[in-house]
Image (tube, rainbow, N blue to C red):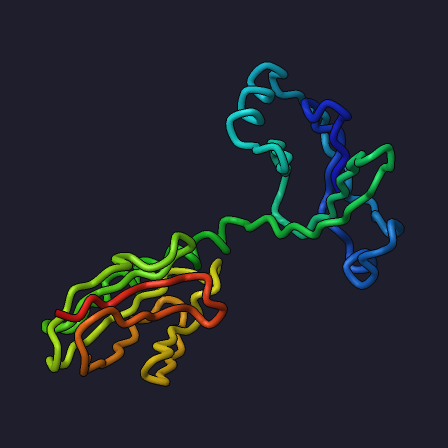
């Protein structure tokens, strides 16, 4: 549970949700005894500079620090056209054990080599890297997709023209074999078509 001052510069109160709160996200009871957190402040000028640098006309940026790992409920109030709207969020703040587990998965997968005759393609929140690959017509190729984390929609890769679809588990290298039959461009996307890549067939 988090309370931030109106100008977003003071962090007033915070504590992880109790079991009662987690079972009823719409309620605000059941804080329990272990919920005290000392107030602290951030420099207003620094906060405003960060907010201006990060936010667009349709975005709101705020910076805060959570006192300990846990599951938090956060409410934001926005005034639009004279009406105040309250929007609830649930935020999971990872502890050191969670971070070490993620680092272990990431380092393990990163060390998995692509086949000697393969092309490694990384999948992240930025999309495919590389996203444009030149290949030869009629020559089989192996694309080694590596998905570093689950914070993206790249859980599968789809080649629409080939009716080919492959799951991409996190932390694993998945090899997809393709033989381009025609010159031109052969597209591949994620399942939601938000990530896009192209094989340029010469």
Residue 12 image position (x, y, % from top left):
75, 28
Q: Is residue 128 above or below residue 165?
A: above
The answer to which of 14 and 138 lies nearer the viewer is 138
Quadrant hosting residue 173 = bottom left
Residue in view at x 65 percent, y 50 percent: 91
- Single out the residue that lies furthest toward the bottom: 163
Residue 170 image position (x, y, % from top left):
40, 68
Residue in view at x 24 percent, y 71 percent: 144
Question: In this image, 143 relative to 22: left or right?
Answer: left
Q: Quadrant of the N terminus?
A: top right
Q: Is residue 145 above or below residue 29?
A: below
Quadrant hosting residue 145 = bottom left
Q: Is residue 54 above or below residue 122?
A: above
Residue 26 image position (x, y, % from top left):
84, 56
Q: Is residue 64 visible?
A: no
The answer to which of 107 and 125 lies nearer the viewer is 125
Question: In this image, 161 relative to 81: left or right?
Answer: left
Q: Is residue 107 above or below residue 201?
A: above
Question: In this image, 155 relative to 112: left or right?
Answer: right
Residue 193 image position (x, y, % from top left):
46, 67
The answer to which of 117 and 178 lies nearer the viewer is 178
Q: Quadrant of the C terminus?
A: bottom left
Residue in view at x 36 percent, y 64 percent: 147
């Amino acid at each position: 549970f988090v309370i931030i001052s109106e100008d977003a510069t003071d962090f007033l109160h915070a504590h992880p949700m109790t079991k009662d709160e987690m079972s009823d996200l719409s309620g605000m009871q059941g804080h329990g005894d272990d919920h005290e957190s000392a107030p602290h402040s951030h420099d207003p000028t620094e906060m405003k500079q960060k907010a201006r640098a990060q936010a667009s006309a349709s975005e709101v940026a705020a910076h805060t620090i959570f006192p300990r790992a846990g599951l938090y409920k956060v409410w934001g109030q926005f005034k639009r056209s004279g009406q105040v709207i309250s929007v609830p969020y649930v935020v999971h703040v990872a502890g050191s054990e969670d971070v070490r587990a993620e680092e272990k998965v990431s380092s393990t997968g990163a060390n998995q080599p692509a086949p000697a005759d393969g092309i490694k393609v990384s999948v992240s929140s930025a999309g495919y890297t590389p996203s444009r690959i030149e290949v030869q017509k009629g020559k089989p190729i192996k694309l080694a997709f590596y998905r570093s984390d689950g914070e993206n929609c790249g859980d599968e890769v789809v080649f629409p023209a080939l009716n080919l679809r492959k799951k991409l588990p996190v932390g694993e290298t998945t090899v997809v074999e393709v033989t381009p039959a025609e010159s031109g461009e052969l597209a591949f996307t994620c399942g939601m078509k938000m990530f896009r890549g192209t094989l340029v067939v010469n």
